[in-house]
Image (spheres, helix red, strand yellow):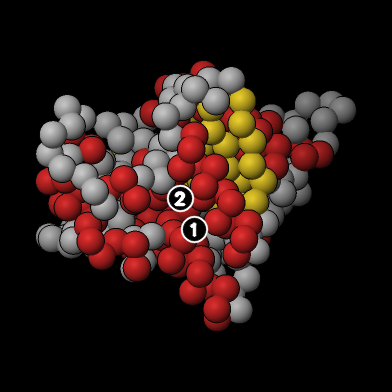
Amino acid sequence: MAFIHMNLISTALMRTVPVNVIIPADKPDFPGIPKRENKPYKTLYLLHGVLGSYVDWVNGTRIQRFAEMNDLVVVMPSGENSFYVDMPNGSDNYGDFIGRELVELTRKIFPLSHKREDTFIGGLSMGGYGAIRNGLKYHDTFGYIAGLSSAMILEKANVADDSSPLFFEKKSFLESVFGDLSKIQDCEINPEWIAGNMKEDGIPFPHMYLACGLDDPLLSPNRKFRDTMRELGVDVTYEEGPGAHEWDFWNRYIKKVLDWLPLDKNSK
């Protein structure tokens, strides 16, 4: 198992971005264990939450071990507090970076499959929203989307003010990320709007996995989003379980995500 830290120069963001990559390229051959076929790797682009960074998933879960068991490459970029969208001001085009540029760069560097059905995106909280939004927008790239405790906050954002003690609930912060909050329901900021347009245009949806803890304050919006996706015809696998907005929950459920993905199970 190789664990690689990189600094990539991003034209979408106009700066250098740190990225961690797990790649199971150095697994030893032991008697009785099937040898992996020499072919491009399936890849999961895995996004962190608000206040987090590219180190979170490795520090908070056993994703490195899970990736090794499944011969899966995992790419973990730093997304700051961007919600992984193209911000209205400046050069913070995180949606373009995550959905296009990062995939192109990592495919040049590593032996990754270019097939849609082998390319996955997932995340937790803010990263769950980012995975869903960009997985739908860049549906030609990603065949599978996974959102854990996803921050489906757009309805609440539409009525936000600056009275909340939490910076990510303040109207001023949300406007810096999403722009005019009165318009976010009917544009590419809103995953439901993207999915509705995909349905109208007859575009096949990526497969989707959603999960949320029973004590998570985001449980209700995740249930609502699940229902909307199913009404549109998206293939959604949805699970709930004990836990709040916490790493114990995400560690358990990222394993369930990998069990759900179409990985080479016989290579464990």
Say above or below: 268 vs 210: above
Q: Is residue 152 left or right of residue 254?
A: left
Q: Where residue 131 is drawn, which disc sits there?
A: 2
Q: Amino acid at mark 2?
A: Ala
Rendered location of residue 245, percent (x, y): 43, 25
Kindly identify which residue carries mark 1: 135
Image quadrant for the N terminus? Answer: top right
Q: Quadrant of residue 144?
A: bottom right
Q: Give the camera-side residue of 127 and 60.
A: 127
Secondary structure under tag 1 reads: helix
Image quadrant for the C terminus? Answer: top right
Q: Residue at x 50, y 42 (%)?
A: 222
Q: How far apart are the two marked residues, 1 and 2, measured between alpha carbons?
A: 5 Å
Outermost residue toward the front? Answer: 159
Q: Is residue 253 left or right of residue 70?
A: left
Q: Amino acid at mark 1?
A: Gly
Rendered location of residue 102, percent (x, y): 39, 56
Rendered location of residue 20, percent (x, y): 40, 38
Say above or below: 235 vs 242: below
Q: Residue at x 21, y 52 (%)?
A: 177
Q: Give the camera-side residue of 20 and 218.
A: 218
**Whether label 1 touches label 2, CB < 8 Å:** yes
Label 2 environment density (alpha carbons within 10 Å; few <14, some 14–19, many ≥20)? many
